Amino acid sequence: MDSLFGPDSRLVYKHYATLYFVLVFDGSENELAMLDLIQAALFLYLFVYHYCSNQNVIKKNHIVWFLI
């Protein structure tokens, strides 16, 4: 991962049902804060659409980017 993103990069992921959320960030960020960001993005998506599936994310990816 160092050769791709740099020596000070970190990777955090969260798995919900069939969805994987992956964030790559530098060492100045907190890992728990990134996990909270993933959870907040998922809750926001669930609040707007009441259902979250990988097909919804793929078909409505412009809305996902707007929410994030």
Image: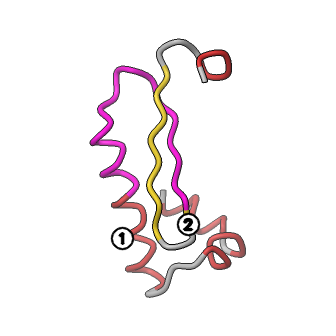
Q: Magenta residues?
A: 20-38
Binning the other alpha carbons within 10 Å of mark 2 as few (below 14), some (14 to 19) or many (20 upward) gives some
Q: How far across and down, in percent of the image, does residue 47 sit? A: 38, 80
Which label belongs to residue 19? 2
Nearer-the-camera pick, 23 or 49? 23
Which label belongs to residue 54? none
| Separation (CA) of disc 1 from disc 2 | 13 Å
Please report contact status of discs 1 and 2: CB closer than 8 Å, yes or no: no
**Residue 65 in which image quadrant:** bottom right
Q: Is residue 9 above or below residue 19?
A: above
Q: State how many labels appear.
A: 2
Helix, strand or loop at mark 2: strand
Please name the residue that numbered disc 1 is placed on.
43
Q: Which amino acid type is shown beneath numbered disc 1?
A: Phe
Q: Which residue is rendered at x = 66% and y = 73% of the image?
A: 60
Q: Which residue is rendered at x = 48% and y = 63% of the image?
A: 67
